[in-house]
Amino acid sequence: MVVVLGPRLVHHDTRGRADFAFARLPAIRVGIRPCGRRASKTRPIKANPELLPPGSSVPKGQKAMVHCSDISTLLASVPPLLGFIPENSLVCMICEEQKVIMTLRIDLPDPTQSEIFAQKIAHIVLGQGENVTAIVAVFGGGALTSAGTPPHADLIDALHRLLGDDHLAHGAALWAEACAEGARWCCYCGECDVSGTLPDPSATELAAESAAAGVVTHARRSELARYVATASEHDVARRAALLGDMSSTWACSSREALALVRDAVHAMARGDLEADDAFIARMAMALDDERVRDASLSFAAEEHATAAEHLFFMLTRECPAPYRAEPAVLAAFYSYLRGEGALASMALDAAVEAAPGHGLTKLLRFAIDSATPSAVLRHLVHRAGVEAVAMLAEDSDE
Ligand SMILES: [Zn+2]
């Protein structure tokens, strides 16, 4: 079996904390040999058409390819696919035409919830297309039983039953006691003696290529929280007072407000942005205009997309609530488009907490919860671009 693992998207589910990673990294080509156990033929459940995103093709891996020929290395290569080291997690690499098009990570369930949990994963896998296959890895979750069975075997059995041989080959479900150097791993089939230990996850070829490409891999998922955490309560309280005064005198049109955001994106790209209180407050007021916020998706189509994303994350950390909801949902959108699902989820959580319920937040939550490929959301960027051009052309005395 030859598998090409591509870039990452991550998904977050508030009910069970799950992450999807779509691919953007250097891709990895894996030639692992399943243990070869023959299984009885089972029938997969049908994909639920409602879960199939429209035009559900995912961006093809575009970057350098990393070749991986053994299971030990594959398991150790998971952190750069997710952006962090998984702990007590099930990781499902969903492959199409030998490429991994999405990586799902989800907290391991209470064993009594194995069936429901397996159904959820199976629907996500089958929702990605008729021809997808999965490689499943459980990291942690307990120790081998005295009989040598890995933990969460019921969950794996349920997945085999629901996905069938066509979508989850026997020998493609693996357990590792941790995602760490020297951690033992084995196959779930119970009939082979395929096993080994993990090499250093920070020293895999994929880790090296990812680092060279500037892709950050964190030690823990929780480390992502710092990208959206309020920088200083004291500073934010001062800006809240400033915004209280400004809100009654703010007179910028949508055109002027969008121009302010555009100029800030360009300043961020040049590296000469001066983010004092007055600037933060102006950005908060500008993005509080729903038209301006939605049109600000348009920068994702430009060369300054990275600068725009940095600006929106910075504003998320520096703006008081409820204003921080607007840059937070933009930050979530931009990171989701890049395939950074876990980060997008955290930014979206910040947006919901600051101002529950606006439309873009709901749309993005739906997209993430249903594992919508980021490419599908690109049409919103295009629409925002058309709207932005129209807004900037509006009569200045409107
Ligand atoms: Zn086996």
Image: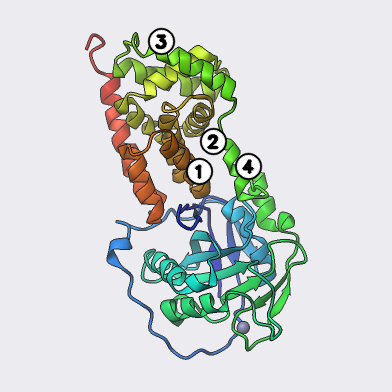
The quadrant of the picture showing ligand 1 is: bottom right
Q: Quadrant of the N terminus?
A: bottom right
Question: Sequence order check: which comes first, mark 4 or mark 3?
Answer: 4
Residue 229: % across, % down: 56, 34
User: Which amino acid type corresponds to the residue marked 2 in the rendered image?
Assistant: Val
Q: What number is the disc on residue 214?
A: 4
Disc 1 residue lies near ligand 1 with CB under 8 A: no
Classify 10 Å Cα crowding around label 4: few (below 14), some (14-19), many (20 and above).
few
Give the answer, above or below, for where 377 lies relative to 199: above
For the residues labelled 2 and 4, the Cα–Cα distance comes to 20 Å
Q: Nearer the viewer, residue 269 or 234?
A: 234
Question: Sequence order check: which comes first, mark 3 or mark 1?
Answer: 3
In the picture of the structure, the residue carrying the numbered disc 1 is 346
Residue 305: % across, % down: 47, 33
Question: Sequence order check: which comes first, mark 1 or mark 4?
Answer: 4
For the residues labelled 4 and 3, the Cα–Cα distance comes to 41 Å
Residue 180: % across, % down: 72, 61
In the picture of the structure, the residue carrying the numbered disc 2 is 228
